[in-house]
Amino acid sequence: MSLIARADRHQTRTIDPVAVPGAGNINVPIQLNCTQVRGRVVDAAGLPVAGVVVRLGDTAGNPLLDPNGNPYTQTTRPDGSFVFDCVPHGLAVVWNAVDGQSLPITVPPEALANVTIVVQVRCGNLVGRVTDAATGQPIQNARVSVAFTMLQTTTDATGNFRFNNVCPPGRRTVDATALGCQPGSATGNVPAAGDSSSFEIRLTCTTAVVSAIIARLDWGIQPPDLDAHLSGPNPLGGRFHLFFGDM
């Protein structure tokens, strides 16, 4: 015989076959997976749009709530994707904050719901640079993020960073962090198309000055002998090697 398990917010699952004994009971554990609504937000050219707020609602315009009672709200990832878990079955509406478009969908119990939202506005690129406030030198590998979004990147060797397809256009705060520096931020203006004017995030960094490094090695009776070797760069571009034969 077959067993079919159904529950709202979950995918229907069939267990087949199920061996039923001639007497007594049988325990059949059934684990149901959450019903998901997956999608992507793209522009008119089919390019992914990151940082877009997407919400789920019902056909009356009310927000749908997750099992914890919170509204279904997400911000699209760098590839433009979003995922809502454990969505109730039936008719729903996907809304995005770029152009206010509402897309009706049907959330089925049998499989996942996949949607593609094409926003009708063009998105610009956000470009800038992270530097040391004291020296003006570029900072490489600084972690840069657009505030209130999932957009993140790191600076290149010249301290530059770029975020493509940032929607909607307007002023955005960009935060930056780097090793040995205090966090900093600056504001850039995202155009409707193309690159923004490059702006600079200046970080206050501290340089540690070390006058001496002491290495100490202690050991007891076992093992009876250990050798210490120390190697590192020298001013001539090579490496030094300190050990018992050359102190």
Image (cartoon, helix red, strand yellow):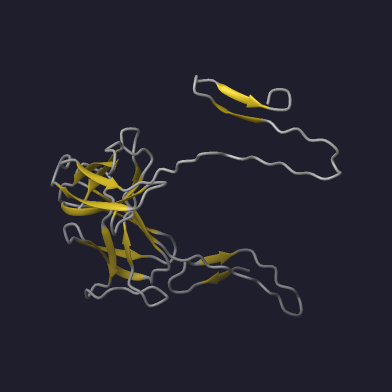
Kindly identify the residue that appears in the image at 57 percent across and 68 percent down: 31
- Image mark count: 0
Residue lying farthest to the front in this orientation: 211
Locate residue 52 relative to residue 196 in the image: left or right. Answer: right
Comparing 54 with 171, the one in front is 171
Location of residue 87 by image quarter: bottom left
In this orientation, does residue 158 appear?
Answer: yes
Front residue of 61/208: it is 208
Quadrant for residue 62, please give it.
Answer: bottom left
Where is residue 121? Give x, y as percent: 15, 50
Could you say where residue 34 lies in the image, as x and y percent from the top left? 47, 66
> Between 172 and 207, which is closer to the camera in this rendering?
207
Residue at screen point 35% across, 33% down: 157
The C terminus: image quadrant = top right
Image spot of residue 99 (x, y percent): 16, 58
Q: Nearer the viewer, residue 232 or 47?
A: 232
Q: Is residue 148 left or right of residue 206?
A: left
| Residue located at (18% from left, 60% from top) | 101
- Asked whether residue 168 is in view, the answer is no
Horizontal side of 188 relative to 41 (left or right) equals: left
Provide residue 234's location: percent of width, then percent of height.
53, 24
Is 7 situated above or below 235? below
Q: Is residue 4 left or right of residue 165?
A: right
Q: Does 34 sit above or below residue 81? A: below
When asked about the image quadrant of residue 156, the answer is top left
From this viewpoint, which residue is outermost toward the left? Answer: 192
- Assign the N terminus to one quadrant of the image: bottom right
> Residue at the bottom extreme?
24
